[in-house]
Amino acid sequence: MNTAVACWRVGRVLAHVLSGMAQILLVFPRLAQPRRDQRVQAWARDMLRRLGVELQLTGAPPISGPMLLVANHISWLDILVLHAARHCRFVSKSDVKQWPLIGTLATASGTLYIERASRRDVMRVVHRMAQALKDGDILAVFPEGTTGDGKTLLPFHANLIQAAISAHAPVQPVLLQFVDGRTGAASRAMSYIGDESLLGSLWRTLCARQLRAVVAYGVPQYAQDRDRRTWARDLHAAISAMQPR
């Protein structure tokens, strides 16, 4: 039964991807940026519905920028979920830009790309992030640098936090969770860690019943004379404290 549901969802997802590509090529060139952002958020919400993922928000998403969202990282699904909750610009590894279809969609949503192995490129992106925050954008980063199991936070890399310090912008901690909508227990359907493959994670997500994505927004905070490493540790503690016990 789950396989039949998954195959039906695959067709709907592919159709929605092609619809997004058509909007980017034919509609986006005629739209101002705020209208593009609205389209991206609406597209992401519809994609979650086609994947069979319910969205639940707690706390207060930012109404406007500048704001840097700092979230834990569990799955490829995180980006869709955060876009659906509140449109934001992500910082992503540079090779995503070259991925078929996905790269086009990511670029159209305002993604900033970074060569993580290059210290010079990290500094370049930090400067771009700071300028975007000064311009009033909402940005989002995953400071763990890779996906985790959703139970324990990995240590935070502090480099990108510098952008908020340079721009005198607030940072909002965000906790992402995926749960079984029937039981409320943590779900591993969309897990993407270790040796797990992207296709395997996608297939498990498509097969899942009543999968719910929970986005919990914490209280925004300013640097208040903290350096980026101290602030990163405090943000790590804030997100850890938001996790259910």
Image (cartoon, helix red, strand yellow):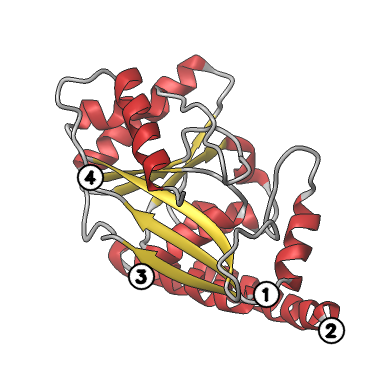
Q: Is residue 183 above or below residue 219?
A: below
**Distance between mark 3 and mark 4 Cα atoms:** 23 Å
Residue at the disc numbered 4: 220
219 left or right, relative to 156: left
Work out whether mark 2 precedes mark 3 in sequence or the reverse, and give the earlier one: 2
The residue under the point 54% across, 44% down is 73
Work out whether mark 4 precedes mark 1 in sequence or the reverse, and give the earlier one: 1
**Distance between mark 1 and mark 2 Cα atoms:** 18 Å
Residue type highlighted by circle 1:
Val
How crowded is the residue under tag 3: few (<14 C-alpha within 10 Å), some, or many (20+)?
Answer: some
Work out whether mark 1 precedes mark 3 in sequence or the reverse, and give the earlier one: 1
**Within the image, what quadrant is residue 181 found in?**
bottom right
Residue type highlighted by circle 2:
Met
Residue type highlighted by circle 4:
Pro
**Distance between mark 2 and mark 4 Cα atoms:** 44 Å
Residue at the disc numbered 3: 38
Residue at the disc numbered 2: 1
- Looking at the rendered structure, which numbered label has been put on residue 13? 1
